[in-house]
Image (cartoon, rainbow, N blue to C red):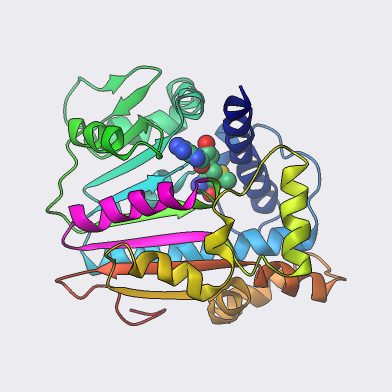
Amino acid sequence: TDSDTADEAVRATCDDASTCKRFATSKGYWKDPYIQYFVRSVGERKAPEINRGYYARVQGVNQLLDAFIRKTQCDCQVINLGAGLDTTFWRLKDENLLPKKFFEVDFPAIVARKIHNIKTKPPLSKPIVETHSTDSLLLDSRSLDSDRYCIIAADLRDVANLESKLKKFQLNTELPTLFLSECVLVYMTPPQSFSLLHWAAKTFHTAMFINYEQVNMSDRFGQVMIENLQRRQCSLTGVEACQSLDSQKERFLSTGWENTDALDMMTVYSVLPQDDVSRIEALEFLDEKELLQQLLQHYNICWASKDKLNLGKSPWSF
Ligand code: SAM
């Protein structure tokens, strides 16, 4: 059916993200010793502005995520929605920043691939076994459940089913919880993403949501981005919320979140540690400075919180 084709195109975006991350790390933009086990070959060259864009995305999201985990002293949960082949679990383990439990959710086909890689690659499975207390570790093609890491196959557009699966795997609604979504909400219709955000806000008393996705899509550059995706049968059904930083924030405010802020990636790039930015800018010559700016202005990180503990109120540095 048409909707199967559309879902398949959305699932394929998972490979875009991981092949771009694989390429950028092979060039030294940041370190990720685990991504090679999900994406075997470095693949074809990506333009320097793409690599810098991914650098800003990964560093920006990591800074907010790590600040939340530190603030809660790891007494928290993380739920990565539409996680794809993301390797954050292993990075947090290596940096001694593992939350009480790290959850990931994606479509069954993506989850099956991820679990297959974990099963067959000891550098991926070892840290999961090491952080698990008993011999019984649930691992089939649809889910993985251990003490600290859980991967669930579910459709984010069905919130009731999502909630029951998370609860089955010991989601604790009393713990401070961080939600993460990178280029995921944009593939859901506004009512679908609203009900997901609303559920998250009403279920936890202390929570933060970090969302990375397109913004400022109504100008010419944004239209070209949309057309490029459409050519691959991929439609940004949620693009309505991507008109401006204000519409990104409004989506959270209207679904029960209390404090919210949003920065376009050009701004994020300018608040990242500048010594590291200088280091990566020396990695590859960038001819098209203007193209990089345009690109960065069309993505943003929006975050929102709901907290009795007053986590994450002040913008970047907490
Ligand atoms: N967040 C990962 C990253 O940044 O590397 C992957 C990003 S990829 C662009 C979007 C991911 O969201 C895909 O893995 C896709 O399968 C997942 N996704 C999109 N809509 C979904 C839905 N309704 N239910 C579950 N997963 C979904």
* Residue at the image position 74 percent from the left and 56 percent from the top: 225
x and y, in percent, of residue 304 in the image: 35, 68
User: In front: 94, or 202?
Assistant: 202
Res 262 visible:
yes
- Asked whether 204 falls inside the magenta stretch, the response is yes
x and y, in percent, of residue 120 in the image: 48, 20
x and y, in percent, of residue 129 in the image: 29, 30
User: In front: 210, or 87?
Assistant: 210
Report the span colored magenta: 188-213
Q: Is residue 11 above or below residue 68?
A: above
Q: Residue furthest top?
A: 140
x and y, in percent, of residue 178 in the image: 30, 57
Number of numbered markers:
0
Q: Residue furthest right?
A: 287
The image quadrant of residue 118 is top left
* Residue at the image position 77 percent from the left and 49 percent from the top: 228
Res 34 visible:
no
User: In front: 172, or 256?
Assistant: 256
- Asked whether 301 falls inside the magenta stretch, the response is no
* Residue at the image position 42 percent from the left and 50 percent from the top: 191
Would residue 8 be found to the left or right of residue 89 on screen?
right
Q: Which quarter shows the C terminus?
A: bottom left
Q: Which quarter shows the N terminus?
A: top right
Q: Is residue 164 above or below residue 238?
A: above
Would residue 32 be found to the left or right of residue 169 on screen?
right
